[in-house]
Amino acid sequence: MSQVSSSNGKISLYNLIQSHLVEINHLKKQCKTKQCRRNLQRIPRHMRRRAASNNPKRLPKSIQELIKENDIKNLKKRKKIRKRHWKKRSKDPRKSDLHVWFAKRFKLVFCWNQFVPYKNNVKNQRILYRNLTKGYTAFYLPFVKFVLIENSNFCDHISEFCSAEDNEFLRDIPDGNILTIHLHQPGKYPDCLIGPCRIIKMNRGKKFLLMIHILVCEELISKFNENHQMSYEILECSQIQLFGKESLKRIKNKVLSKFQLEGVPFDQFQFFDIKNQIKLDGWEEFLTKINRPNEESIAIKRIIISNSIESLTIIVPRQILRKVWNSINFNMAHLVGGIRDLEVMTLNFSSSFFPNIGYLDCISNRSTLINYPLLNGQKIHIVRNQKFIQELIDQNYNLLTIKKFVNETQSSSIDSFVQIVLKYLKGKPKKMDKILLPNTQKSSTIIKFMKIENLENFIDKNEANDTVIGYVEYGCFDMNFARCRAFGIISLDGLERLIRFNQAIKYVEDDANSIKYSAIFALTKSQYNHLNLVTIELVNPETII
């Protein structure tokens, strides 16, 4: 150091370089070396794996030729998966035809006796929301089954499983139209709900195609085998659902590029033969090509949902499912959603999703009623009479309409509930939160919240005075509303009492101004006794999936 620094305290640059000359020459020699030391360093940066391996067999073949043969021979040989093993994997009934594709990109959950994609590994919730109006989003529904029934007396047999009104609609609809009905156990309507069923009438009522959930399919087929000698066939088809403004454009560009799809009508299935590039006439011709391995045909139906959002239902035979799915979602895996995204979407559309949302009274959910004290041990019935609900909404929740319906239809042994959507003014919803009828102590909470929007100072922890009239079934943050929304049920008796309470506080005096509130206010209470103020709306949900 004394040679580098001079007597006046300054550093000599020449002496500093001379002292590090050995290190500098070593670096220059390393930079002139043409061959990299590690095999991975010979690959361009864009071709390198994130989890690098020293195994030269995992490198591109063009680089493997430059590696010494001794390095390759010294590697341990890996055990190969035998052919019979991966064939056994593909025959697993719990795995769908696209199981490998989703296993690499999704978190899977085991429900309904099979592995179902739950959510994408990419954080794509906001992307899916934006593409509902600007682009498209894709969903694969492995839990939807297709059952073909050839029986001219099918309407007579199905009358035991549904209401008389639904059976009349089924007899009157023309060929090719779709009708959604709710099935119950034979002779037990309105109790013991099995689930929803979509029925397509064909060949003047001689053939019927059922589009049903796998839980409904198992229950319905077992009942058919017990009571009726009815022939049926489970078709090897799958359903792909697209949502968004450019859904039809995506199908045209990737699958049906040689067809004119601009004039495709809504609410009607259209059939296309991809291999021969022709348009099929109807269901009869499409069904004959489903089980043929060399045929490539699909069925498409356009639907308009709320807020002019377009949906596309695609029925794809099993032999071309992977081909069609890979064509639609090539390099677009971030636009694919799972069950979690379907639940959020159905809440945004104020619709239902079997069996997770809107079907607490079905047989498959009876075991979960233990968590709901108001529902446990009782026969419950969720009113799905569209005429009554629409009349109640149009008449601004008329109390006489509720009383008239209760007197005509409600049995003393069955409690009737209606489905509602809750808008949270503050707080987050959680499953099994209680919907309360505000008492005299909590009425001041609602009135003061209308003015100052502060609920924490008015929380009443006296649970003895709380009257539970309903429950929250599912809730999440709504990007349209910019606050939380939830889906729940409320008893008809509780709805009547809640309307009477809101009529008493309809007008709020604020000095010289009189403010009118048309919304119905209620309170929700979590398991930790946290109160949230909500407004409720009566809905008439339809099953869009």
Image (cartoon, rainbow, N blue to C red):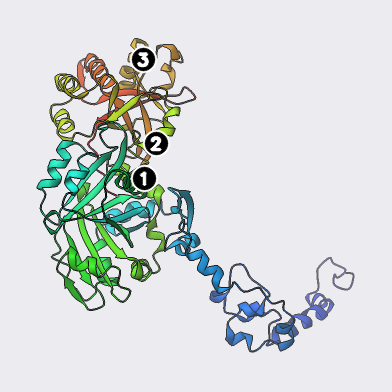
- In the image, which is nearer the foreground, mark 2 or mark 3? 2
For label 3, count other residues whose C-alpha is less than 10 Å away and answer few (under 14), some (14-19) or many (20+): some
Which residue lies under the disc numbered 2?
365
Secondary structure of the residue carrying tag 3 is helix
User: Which one is in front, 272 or 45?
Assistant: 272
Q: How far apart are marks 1 and 2 (CA)?
A: 17 Å
- In the image, which is nearer the foreground, mark 1 or mark 2? 2
Which callout, 1 or 2, points at the residue further toward the start of the chain? 1
User: Three-letter amino acid code at disc 2?
Assistant: Asn
**Residue 343, numbered circle:** 1
Secondary structure of the residue carrying tag 2 is helix
* The quadrant where residue 501 appears: top left
Count of numbered marks: 3
The structure residue drawn at horizontal position 63% and vertical position 70%, both measured from the top left corner, is: 52
User: Which one is in front, 545 or 167?
Assistant: 167
User: Three-letter amino acid code at disc 1?
Assistant: Glu
